[in-house]
Image (cartoon, helix red, strand yellow):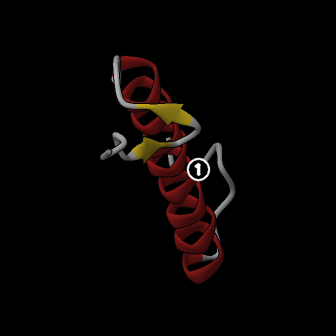
Amino acid sequence: MRTKPQVRGQIGGNRRPALARTWKILDIFEGTQQIQQLIIARRLLGKTSAELK
């Protein structure tokens, strides 16, 4: 007898909750990456956050 593959703690069935979590994680990661780029740019240019607005 074959069983359905596990998807992030769920067995088959509805994958929407797992996909929603994945999208949220990617969203947070993208925002974090943008903040890191701004911090690096400020340091390289020797500017404050107010000066780069």
Instruction: Give percent across and percent down for residue 49.
Output: 65, 49
Nearer-the-camera pick, 4 or 52: 4
Q: Is residue 21 shown above or below 44? A: above
Query: Farthest residue in the front direction?
Result: 1
Residue 44 x/y as whole percent = 57, 82
Left-right relation of 48 to 12: right
> Which quadrant is the N terminus positioned in?
top left
Residue at (58, 50) in percent of width and height: 51
Percent x, y for residue 20? 41, 24
User: Relative to residue 42, is residue 53 drawn left or right?
Assistant: left
Q: Amino acid at mark 1?
A: Glu
Q: Which of the 4 image quarters holds residue 13? A: top left
Q: Position of residue 15 (x, y in %)?
A: 35, 25
Label 1 element class: loop
Q: Residue at x 64, y 43 (%)?
A: 50
> How many discs mark residues in the rendered view?
1
Q: Which residue shows up at 45% across the image and 44% down it?
A: 6
3 up-or-down from 47: above or below = above
- List the residue tagged with mark 1: 51
In this view of the protein, which residue sits in the foreground, 18 or 44? Answer: 18
Crowdedness near tag 1: few (<14), some (14–19) or many (≥20) residues, C-alpha within 10 Å: few
Q: Is residue 32 above or below residue 7?
A: below
Give the residue displayed 51% in from the left and 31% down from the top: 10
The quarter of the picture where residue 27 lies is: top left
Q: Is residue 39 above or below residue 45?
A: above
